[in-house]
Amino acid sequence: MGRKLLLEHINVPGINTFDVYRSKGGYASVEKALKTLSPDDVVEEVKKSGLRGRGGAGFPTGMKWSFLAKPEGVPRYLVCNGDESEPGTFKDRYLMTHIPHLLIEGMIVASYALGAKTSYIYLRGEMMPQIRILEKAISEAKNAGFLGKNILGTGYDLELYVQPGGGAYICGEETALLESLEGKRGNPRIKPPFPAIAGLYGCPTVVNNVESIAAVVPIINEGGEEYAKIGIGRSTGTKLISAGGNLKRPGVYEIELGVSVEDFIYGDDYCQGIANGKRLKAVVAGGSSVPILPANLILKTINNENRLMSYESLADGGFATGTMLGSGGFIAYDEDQCIVRNTWNFARFYHHESCGQCSPCREGTGWMEKVLHRLEYGHGKMSDMDLLVDVSKKIEGNTICPLGDAAAWPVASAIRHFRDEFEWHVTNPSIALTSNYGLANYADPLPKLEAAEA
Amino acid sequence: MLSVQNTDAPVTFSPELLGKFADVVSRYPEGKQKSALLPILHLVQAELGWVSAPAMDKVAEYLKIEPIEVYEVATFYTMYFLKPQGKYMLEVCRTGPCEIVGATPIMEHIEKTLGVKEGDVTPDGLFSWRGVECLAACGYGPVLQIGPEYTFYENLTNESVDKLISDLKGKANN
């Protein structure tokens, strides 16, 4: 089992309280940063660490920080994105529930690096229990002198607040999140200007995922270069993986990037295989938005190399035979799951969550949902698969925010890899209502690997 | 204490509630009090059980914004109830990962047990239920949540749902 940088003390009783967290070395990074490093030094360490945004896009965090505009006399903001809503992803909830001070500590260091005097943690409204947990942690940290005026006597002031959303997946998109934080509908903004120039209240703003901000703590404690030694290639450090679906031992795992997918699914340290002695049919590796892959392609790349849990290896083969690490929402499907039903479920999700601003997404997601519904319920046509691919291509890249792409990719990839299952639903409408096609067709292991058309 | 208000009658906010509003507003810079809108609507719903038009008008007045600015937000986000619900609203996650571990059978069981369709209220006013999208608890599915505390109930089975419903009935009758 690899090193744990975020969850090392997760099982220590009382680690959710300030005193226990502090006794385990908590808040050391705040002391180190505020007393011995300049804000630019902190940014430099994060750059050296190679940390990439853990919310799904994988953009280098240090680089994002260095883009922040610093005009005189204008406040700057750090906003933590805790809107965690990507189906399959539940790592941030876990982290905040069990070790809330790690996020508070990261927020203080990151706010210091960016020169923010007021920072917000935006959580999805459904996370009311986590909001209560974080507010308690904030008040404990404040009582201990780590928040508020003149932190640790260094002259740095910081106020930290938790903001609830109202239930909308779209608010995980950073500009929609900022709109929501301003008390508006979560309609994404047109970029540019990027939040680094004009974000919250029109001021320079950085928006980072919960896990990215938490990762700043070990980076400052151990140094960016040490952090970068963990992992593989440009996938540095550790990543929280939310493992769900038909796994023997689902849950949140902190892995060193570079663990093989096979080890992650079947290894004793991780998910221990598929539940109920069944076989693996397919995997969505990084949250519902990323392309679904059949068992053979998730375990090995098209070049017959072991597929690894890293940004690069999961993307190997592009969308023809690869996928993405995304947010680390890892969903395993056993041999009894129906890909058509799952694709319809996801399409319904994206239709429900489309903000309605851009026509291709607003209309296209609903159209795909309807077509997939009729395929699942025995009224599909042979031409429907091409229709779905066509609609998905017309959404992709034609919207203000990436929700359009996120809606298009799961549909396009399901048809790319599982077209015969869709066709079987059309030719066997009544049987498809009661039984399942996938039993013998995709379940692991498959001996032959073939590239599908992109 | 949650009390469902069944009409569009005018509302008054208690001094305690107004105190909570003021605490929220203090988190934002001068003149940016509109940022308090989402948290304040949650507070209103926790107090009244839902968000009525008169309540929204009062919120607009309090935040010095137009009523339409409140309506457009309350109708955009899924957590705000625009009509009265049961005292306990069971919100079951129905998205992919929960679906493959049995969300649909759980919803069917709830519908049968409560005897009301999705979105309707039981005659005693205690329960309503609905399917909602991903609740970010995918490793512990099927899950449901109950506001206004948003307590989660995980790894649901028909038996655990039955027990939950009977516990809530007991709680309501005490």
Image (cartoon, helix red, strand yellow):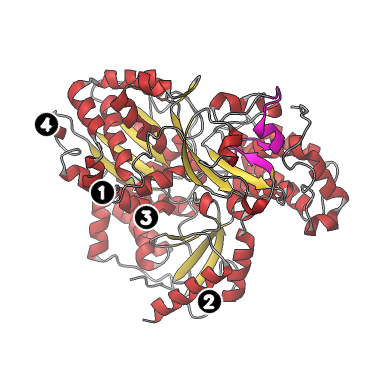
Q: Which residue is mark 4?
A: A153
Sequence order check: which comes first, mark 4 or mark 1? 1
Decide: few, some or many residues near mark 2? Use Cα within 10 Å; few <14, some 14-19, many ≥20. some
Give the residue drawn at x 79%, y 39%: A419
Question: Mark on residue B122?
Answer: 2
Numbered disc in front, either 2 or 1: 1
| Mark seen at residue A17 | 1
Q: Position of residue A376 (x, y in %)?
A: 76, 52
Pick out the residue farthest to the front: A268
> Between marks 4 and 1, how big is the CA–CA gap?
23 Å
| Amino acid tagged 1 | Thr
Please name the amino acid that badge 4 sits on: Gly
* Chain label for disc 1: A
Is residue B84 at all visible to an observer of this figure?
no
Q: Secondary structure at mark 1?
A: loop
Question: Is A6 rendered above or below residue A98?
Answer: above
The magenta-colored residue range is A281-304
Q: Residue A205: horizontal and vertical position, in percent? A: 35, 29
Q: Nearer the viewer, mark 3 or mark 1?
A: 1
What's the mark number on residue A350? none
Amino acid type at circle 2 is Thr
- Residue at 84 percent across and 54 percent down: it is A429
Seen at 86% across and 43% down, the residue is: A382
The CA span between labels 2 and 3 is 27 Å
Q: Are marks 2 and 3 in contact (CB under 8 Å)?
A: no
Query: Separation of disc 3 and disc 4 at Cα?
Result: 33 Å
